[in-house]
Image (tube, rainbow, N blue to C red):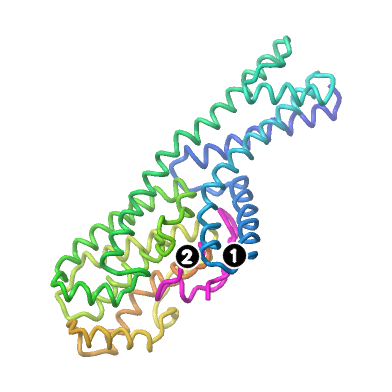
């Protein structure tokens, strides 16, 4: 072998290793790990999606393009993996004695796709063909095997989001939720809601970091989104703990903390710079005092029991909100979520560094 063929063969072996490592990181390793191949694939695809969205002002069509993003991304990632394996083995075949590039091209494709219409009877090339065929089958099997897991995580999340619609409306509103629960005399049942969402947040921390593609799957209802729903639940818990004149419930604290940890870990995984230890008022929040006062007035008019000291209530609410405010708003921008009060309605443009797509423009 010439020096050129040795160098190409070495590069091909490295490419095979990197591709298999990417597949393991995305579908086997039970933790969120950055991967260059998947990151680049999703970034390029998001650029294409944003380009297509820019061709229309119809919000329904723009949302539809985003709905296709994650499913197409998974299929594209499989195609990228197979293409890289194909190129790597084509290079190996040529470097180890297959006479022409075209012959190496056909043999690699025949082996990878298990077509079997071309083979080479040498021991080395037959072994390489078997290995390439096995790798191709494994990559396809990995995606197929993990689709039910992805759907299961998606289904559990979306069931909770749909249930929240009954309490908080569409788009979800903290004020509407608390007024509705007060009117039907179910304020005591909020403890169950905090418990259910604490469990959901913990489940999502595991599933959405192990299978990051789930982060980008949109809800069946275009007006719903897991992120705006999460923000509404945490804001409601913060409002109950800071402003409502009812017995304190530590379960609300746990719910807020579980949600904060989820958003922070996803944000860090996606490359968002987050304040390591935010505190109010040294760290500002995106909710203004005027917005808080307006919500207070609406709850007061509806007869919801409120604490008399509005200033203390505001400081307490801001102290809760500051824990998750930056992560929530940044992720709303990054994922281009539907407009909802106190979440995506104030999200600026955010660009992704690694781990997925670039952020899009906010809706007006």
- The residue under the point 63% across, 34% down is 82
Q: Which residues lie in the magenta part?
A: 335-364
Q: Nearer the viewer, residue 129 or 263?
A: 129
Instruction: Determine the secondary structure under disc 1.
Output: loop
- Label 2 sits on a secondary structure element that is loop
Image coordinates of residue 348 in percent, x first then y, are 54, 74
Q: Inspect the magenta stretch and tell me whether residue 310 lies in it.
A: no
Q: Are marks 1 and 2 in contact (CB under 8 Å)?
A: no
Q: Quadrant of residue 131?
A: top right
According to the picture, the residue beneath numbered tag 2 turns out to be: 337
Q: Main secondary structure of the magenta part?
A: loop
Q: Which residue is mark 1?
A: 351
- Left/right of residue 139 with respect to residue 224 in the rendered view: right
**Which badge, 1 or 2, is on the more N-terminal residue?**
2
Residue drawn at the location 52% of the way across and 37% of the way down: 24
**CA distance for labels 1 and 2:** 14 Å
Give the quadrant of residue 83: top right
Q: Position of residue 278 (x, y in %)?
A: 42, 73
Identify which residue is drawn at 55% across, 60% down. 271
> Image height check: is 142 above or below 2?
below
Specify the label residue 338 is tagged with.
none
């Amino acid at each position: 072998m010439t020096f050129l063929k040795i160098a190409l063969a070495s590069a091909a072996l490295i490419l095979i290793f990197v591709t298999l490592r990417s597949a393991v990181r995305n579908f086997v390793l039970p933790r969120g790990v950055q991967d260059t191949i998947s990151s680049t694939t999703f970034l390029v695809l998001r650029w294409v999606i944003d380009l297509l969205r820019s061709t229309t002002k119809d919000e329904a069509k723009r949302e539809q393009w985003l709905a296709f993003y994650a499913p197409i991304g998974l299929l594209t990632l499989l195609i990228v993996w197979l293409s890289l394996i194909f190129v790597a083995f084509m290079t190996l075949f040529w470097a180890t004695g297959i006479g022409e590039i075209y012959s190496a091209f056909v043999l690699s494709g025949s082996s990878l796709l298990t077509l079997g219409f071309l083979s080479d009877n040498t021991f080395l090339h037959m072994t390489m063909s078997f290995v390439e065929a096995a790798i191709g089958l494994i990559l396809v099997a990995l995606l197929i095997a993990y689709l039910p897991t992805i759907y299961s995580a998606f289904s559990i999340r979306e069931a909770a989001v749909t249930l929240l619609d009954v309490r908080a409306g569409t788009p979800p509103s903290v004020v509407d939720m608390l007024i509705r629960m007060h009117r039907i005399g179910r304020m005591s049942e909020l403890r169950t809601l905090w418990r259910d969402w604490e469990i959901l947040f913990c489940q999502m921390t595991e599933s959405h970091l192990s299978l990051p593609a789930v982060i980008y799957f949109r809800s069946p209802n275009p007006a719903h989104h897991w992120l705006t729903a999460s923000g509404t639940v945490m804001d409601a818990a913060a409002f109950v703990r800071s402003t409502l004149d009812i017995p304190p419930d530590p379960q609300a604290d746990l719910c807020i903390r579980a949600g904060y940890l989820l958003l922070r870990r996803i944000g860090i995984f996606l490359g968002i710079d987050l304040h390591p230890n935010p505190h109010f008022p040294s760290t500002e929040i995106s909710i203004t005092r005027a917005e808080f006062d307006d919500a207070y007035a609406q709850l007061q008019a509806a007869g919801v029991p409120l604490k008399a000291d509005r200033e203390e209530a505001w400081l307490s609410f801001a102290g809760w909100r500051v824990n998750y405010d930056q992560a929530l708003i940044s992720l709303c921008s990054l994922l281009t979520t539907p407009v909802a009060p106190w979440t995506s309605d104030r999200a600026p443009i955010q660009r992704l560094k690694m781990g997925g797509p670039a952020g899009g423009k906010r809706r007006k």
